[in-house]
Amino acid sequence: MTIDQNQNLGGFLRQEREKRGITLEQIASATKINIKLLYFLEADQYSELPAKPFIRGFVVAYAKFIGLNSKEVLLHFNLYLEQKSFDRLIRDQGHSGYAFEKKESEQSRVVLWFIMGGFVLFGGVMILILKPTFHHHNTPSRIEKLRTLRAIVQSPAISTPSVLPSPSIAPSPSSTVTPSLKLKVIQDPLNSGSNLNTKEVKYKVLFKALVDVWVRYQVDDKAVMKFPLRKDRILVLKVQKEFRFQTSDPKGVSININSQGYKVLQLDPRVVFRQKNATLFIPSETAEKTQDPFPGEKPLPSNPPPSRIAAPLPTQ
């Protein structure tokens, strides 16, 4: 089995299938995989496919049926699948702050608003329908009006006081006490730029850990941060001007800048080595002017982070 180094997984599978004169319908019938998913697999449309474990299962079943060594195929395209498996995350995820984030569903929000609007409209209609009934029950009867009038006539006259109460004096502006204003302070313990509004953000950068890995970064003029980024966690940075980022393992982190798609950091041509660590400068031209991105800092540990560690704190 010969695999072209520049060939995508979908193109390779389609080429091998056509060599053997096998149709997608035959593969779908034998493997019980929906034929639409097979079309997406051959077209490398991973945003339309399910999670990575399912994709690997599809590849194994496909390769075995057409007579390929499935282990060799997965081994060769492993890094490619790692990168492409995030295409579905780009479609589904939204991010804010230091993300250990959940998926957001805009459709669910729209449905919720429609439901709430329906309740409000229903309540308004019911009030209009029942208002005459309420008015009828709350209006005093003729007998009650007569009793009230009789009580007023029979009551003794109320004498008018000879001294009228003095009018109240309005307080002067100087005597008015203004309540203290409580300012809402937005905390950003990771210096991630979560307190910036949309217009202030020039770069929105997502880092996804493929393994437990050490990271260090500085956003704009904020303090330097250093801590372990755990596997499958996502770090979101919002940047006004520039940032610099280091990791102990460039193969263990994927990066997505301004929703341009995830890429393994090791494959990014902008990555340079500073302090013996893979370093990314954004904008990239700042790398030429900066030989020591984190003055006074030691290189990140080459060993993976321990299984448990205290919450991240700024480096001193």
Image (cartoon, rainbow, N blue to C red):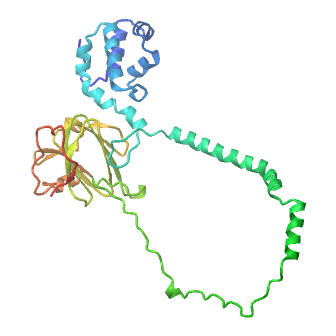
Rendering coords of residue 236 (x, y %): 32, 47
Rendering coords of residue 11 (x, y %): 34, 20
Quadrant of res 4: top left
Q: How many marks?
A: 0
Q: Nearer the viewer, residue 291 or 122?
A: 122
Q: Nearer the viewer, residue 249 or 194?
A: 194
Residue lying at the far bottom in this picture: please name it.
162
Assign the N terminus to one quadrant of the image: top left
The vertical placement of 35 against 51, above or below, is above
Rendering coords of residue 190 (x, y %): 27, 53
Q: Is residue 10 left or right of residue 215?
A: right
The vertical placement of 63 against 149, above or below, is above
Q: Is residue 263 left or right of residue 215?
A: right
Quadrant of res 208: top left
Assign the C terminus to one quadrant of the image: bottom left
Name the residue at 53% across, 86% down: 173
Rendering coords of residue 3 (x, y %): 25, 17
Q: Is residue 152 left or right of residue 79?
A: right
